[in-house]
Amino acid sequence: MGNCLSSRNSKARPSRKPVLSNTEAVHTSRSKATTPSSTLSFSSSDDACGTNKAESGTVLHGDVDDFRQITSYGNVIMFTYDELRLSTRNFRQDLILGEGGFGLVYKGVIDDNIRPGLKPTFVAVKELNRDGHQGDREWLAEVNYLGQLSHPNLVKLLGYCCQDDHRILVYEYMASGSLDKHLFQREAQTITWDTRMKIGLDVAKGLAFLHEAKRSIIYRDFKTSNILLDADYNAKLSDFGLAKEGPIGDKTHVSTRVMGTYGYAAPEYVMTGHLTARSDVYGFGVVLLEMLTGGKALDTNRPGRERNLVEWARPLLVRPNKLLRIIDPRMAGQYSLKAAQIACKLAHRCLSENPKGRPSMTEVVKELEACQSLSEQSMPLFHYNAQDKGLKRALKARGEVKSPLASKGSWGGAALKRRSRRCTSDLPVSFDRPEMSRDPWVASRRGNLTPDHLHEPYNMYKLS
């Protein structure tokens, strides 16, 4: 959930400079080690949270007491505190999946020992910190939206607890944790191009579903830590604490308190507090760019001009000869040039400073499906130094390179000329019959382009 540092009753006029907090934003991640995220907020017109009925038929309850009067909400179960304490073995410390400003997330089990008739299943139990920044408003938003919305790419809310002053949410357990862990933690295994594009397509479908409802819903806090992955890397949106109903009638936007995370929030929303579905599209563009580059939206460890990923990479996304300079080198050899161009151009459109220049999420879904289709049909894209004739002939013999790419970026031209003459220490790299080898070519940690599953340095073998 995002945080708001301003008073709920504040009616001050919007400030042009959002207030920062360094509250951690970790959602159902296995690792306790988290990266502080800058959550932004300044006062604007307060969000209305009264009970109402949306045009789609969704009843939005505006008071916790409403939920105390019912035993179930749709297919969502109202648990007692004792039941969830039993589920998490008294909220045992070694079952913590993640923590942040909202509180703690525990791994639990619900079965017929918790309540007769429940099938055994793992769950994620999120207990809001009573001393933290989160209030009933965000908790209510989660229950209201996830309790009534159902889609394969939205995390499933199984239950909740609002006994006394406890505010607890029970979700389906997502075994692979959050996307940010896989992209940014050094010890994590690199996810492939195809997996990243599938994740992008999954969450794009989730956003499109929200935007296309009869009464549209704006997610408002789209970022990698809010994208959860199951054991098969199917992606789902989580954390609806900041979700907001879209404009109705002839209104073009919703005026609301600015809340979200620096680096992901659309510039026009930060400046004016005007929220539209295209604000979510911008956030999607940032996440797509993170998946393409492997870099964080904001990273103070990078050189000055590269610390803001969007500002640095956006001009390069529409320059074909610069693509390899920004695409994550760990994915070298896993994608075609055409697929890379489609994905990069799509990210560029989503990141347009003009909201009208951004595509709808339905358009995004169609383009990502086309990109995925290309990835399945096209040969991998490889880069080599034109002077390495032996390597060139070997690659052509394998049918994996049809024409050279004379890029001057970090994965072509002079850069590869230096790298191709280095032996790789992390991968075995030679073969007996190059013309019969069908092994994939991969990039090592050093950035060397090498054939996988081989036994000696390939540059020592005479390919001529």
Image (tube, helix red, strand yellow):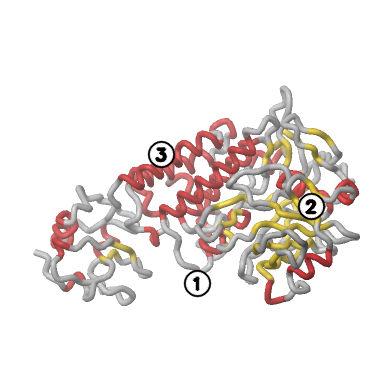
Q: Residue at x 35, y 43 (%)?
A: 374
Which SS class for mark 1?
A: loop
- Above-or-below relation of 246 to 68: above
Disc nearest the viewer among 3 and 1:
3
Given residues 106 and 402, the one toward you in this image is 106
Mark found first going from the N terminus, 1 or 2: 2
Q: Residue at x 18, y 56 (%)?
A: 398
Q: What is the three-letter code of the residue carrying label 1? A: Glu
Measured in 3D between alpha carbons, the distance from the residue under mark 1 to the one under mark 2, in whole angstroms, is: 33 Å
Q: Is residue 405 left or right of residue 368?
A: left
Q: Residue at x 31, y 77 (%)?
A: 425
Q: Residue at x 52, y 63 (%)?
A: 182
Given residues 196 and 288, the one toward you in this image is 196
Q: What is the three-letter code of the residue carrying label 3? A: Ala
Q: What is the three-letter code of the residue carrying label 2? A: Trp
Mark found first going from the N terminus, 2 or 3: 2
Please identify the residue farthest to the front as the structure is shown.
117
Q: Position of residue 90 (x, y in %)?
A: 78, 73
Q: Quadrant of residue 176?
A: bottom right
Residue highlighted by disc 1: 187
Mark found first going from the N terminus, 3 or 1: 1
Please identify the residue farthest to the left as the structure is shown.
464
Please give the label number shown on residue 370: 3
Q: Position of residue 248 (x, y in %)?
A: 73, 27
Residue highlighted by disc 2: 139
Q: Position of residue 208 (x, y in %)?
A: 58, 38
Which SS class for mark 3?
A: helix
Q: Quadrant location of the C terminus?
A: bottom left
Tell me if I can see residue 13 in this picture.
Answer: no
Disc nearest the viewer among 1 and 2:
2
